[in-house]
């Protein structure tokens, strides 16, 4: 529940902030800001992939039960090394990145982003330590402060100090919000931090060997998910139109992110649970978790996606405003594959948990190549909605590939998933019927049986 609240709060504050900003900056400025946010989030997600799964894995394995300080110290060392490398990339290649994406204003934002990356070192480390120890409330509070404070500062900027409203000010406010969140998460994580900083070469090789695949997987996965933004910016010859189209796809992605909140939350919880399951109960439990969770997510997402498909203009009007209603057709097309996305979210965490990070890495590399190729071809052939058409083809082909791997590795059965989906709806229907008929008011004769059920 705390993980769901955590993920929902991130999306909620992001959508509210977007709801305000998108009505006070031009679509072209929004396009540049969207590209910047994507680069920031991709950097953070890639680093979390390098840290999160290896640290949780090694903190949970009995072999390293007496070396928890060494595990944390080694992970922190890797964290610092990656952050220094990322800072160097943005300092020396920031101008080239901005030129490639046809967004000159992006260069200055990337330079300021180096401060953001340095603050992420303690924030990300504490987040993973808390997650490994199932301290989900503290993670929620830190993100709530970080995202909520940024939203409040944006509100003040837009309505009280509009003369200072520009993209550089927004980047600085992000850094301030992250600093406050870092202070809070450090206080919450202090009892769990290592007493002594002690690294181990053997442990570093083992963690890096495991983490390098997760790192690559996150890189390919995030680049694939952002393909419509980056390729649109680079492939559309007209700079103004390119940034405008990026803003359209960003508006659509905001709505998709809302729909995907449960999938992301389940992924966060399912990885440490699967690590425990594979150690204690074997592959059968992992299979059950996957089928059950994906079925539950599909049951939740299906009615939401139907509503969006039926009323795309209304949804776009509410979230982004009148100047983005033109993107309703893009939203409608991309929402057709919303029920497929839970497979993609759960696939990666499941492969990593069962000790198959290499396979996860290779699959995500293949999926990224497919998505980038489809997206580029779609934009060149169909123009503005081309990336949306490409997304449908990519998700269908990707599902076939993912299911083939899951069938072989975990013995996943699609019939079980569909059966669980139908069962979920029947259960909801049964509860609703009892509630409407007043049966819920009747006392249960055997409370013990009711409690067990």
Image (spheres, rainbow, N blue to C red):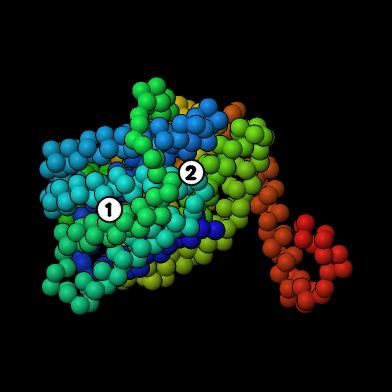
- Counting from the top left corner in percent of width and height, residue 248 is at 30, 58
Q: Which residue is mark 1?
A: 37
Query: What residue lies at 48% left-to-right and 61% top-to-bottom?
Result: 5
Query: What residue lies at 59% left-to-right and 38% top-to-bottom?
Result: 276
**Residue 17 lies in what quarter of the image?**
bottom left
Q: Which residue is mark 2?
A: 132
**First of labels 2, 1 by sequence position:** 1
Quarter that holds the N terminus = bottom right
Mark 2, mark 1: which one is toward the viewer?
A: 2
Quarter that holds the C terminus = bottom right
Residue placed most toward the observer, 452 or 248: 452
Farthest residue in the front direction? 195
- Counting from the top left corner in percent of width and height, residue 207 is at 41, 29
Q: Is residue 396 left or right of residue 27?
A: right
**Residue 81 lies in what quarter of the image?**
top left
SS of the residue under disc 1: helix
């Amino acid at each position: 529940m705390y993980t769901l609240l955590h993920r929902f709060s991130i999306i909620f504050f992001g959508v509210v902030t977007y709801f305000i900003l998108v009505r006070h900056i031009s679509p072209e400025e929004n396009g540049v800001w969207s590209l910047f946010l994507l680069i920031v989030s991709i950097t953070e997600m890639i680093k979390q992939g390098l840290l999160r799964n290896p640290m949780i894995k090694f903190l949970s394995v009995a072999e390293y039960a007496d070396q928890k300080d060494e595990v944390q110290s080694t992970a922190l060392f890797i964290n610092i090394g990656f952050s220094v490398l990322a800072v160097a990339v943005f300092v020396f290649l920031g101008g080239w990145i901005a030129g490639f994406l046809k967004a000159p204003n992006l260069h200055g934002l990337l330079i300021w982003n180096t401060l953001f990356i340095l603050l992420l070192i303690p924030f990300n480390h504490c987040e993973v330590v808390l997650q490994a120890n199932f301290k989900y409330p503290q993670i929620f509070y830190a993100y709530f402060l970080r995202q909520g404070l940024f939203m409040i500062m944006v509100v003040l900027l837009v309505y009280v100090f509009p003369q200072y409203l520009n993209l550089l000010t927004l980047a600085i406010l992000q850094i301030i919000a992250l600093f406050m969140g870092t202070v809070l998460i450090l206080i919450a994580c202090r009892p769990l931090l290592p007493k002594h900083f002690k690294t181990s070469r053997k442990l570093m090789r083992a963690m890096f060997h495991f983490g390098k695949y997760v790192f690559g997987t996150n890189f390919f996965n995030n680049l694939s998910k952002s393909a419509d933004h980056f390729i649109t910016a680079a492939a559309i010859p007209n700079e103004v139109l390119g940034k405008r189209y990026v803003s359209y796809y960003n508006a659509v992605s905001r709505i998709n992110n809302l729909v995907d909140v449960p999938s992301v939350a389940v992924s966060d919880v399912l990885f440490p649970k699967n690590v425990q399951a594979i150690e204690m109960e074997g592959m059968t439990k992992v299979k059950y978790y996957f089928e059950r969770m994906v079925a539950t997510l599909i049951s939740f997402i299906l009615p939401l996606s139907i509503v969006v498909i039926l009323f795309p203009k209304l949804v776009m009007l509410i979230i982004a405003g009148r100047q983005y209603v033109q993107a309703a057709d893009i939203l409608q097309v991309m929402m057709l594959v919303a029920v497929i996305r839970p497979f993609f979210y759960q696939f990666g965490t499941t492969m990593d948990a069962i000790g198959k990070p290499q396979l996860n890495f290779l699959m995500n590399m293949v999926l990224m190549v497919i998505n980038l190729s489809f997206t580029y071809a779609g934009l060149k052939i169909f123009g503005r909605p081309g990336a949306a058409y490409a997304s449908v083809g990519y998700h269908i082909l990707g599902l076939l590939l993912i299911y083939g791997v899951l069938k072989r590795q975990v013995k996943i059965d699609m019939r079980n998933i569909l059966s669980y989906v139908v069962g979920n709806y029947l259960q909801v229907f049964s509860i609703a019927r009892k509630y409407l008929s007043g049966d819920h008011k009747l006392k249960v004769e055997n409370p013990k049986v009711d409690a067990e059920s």
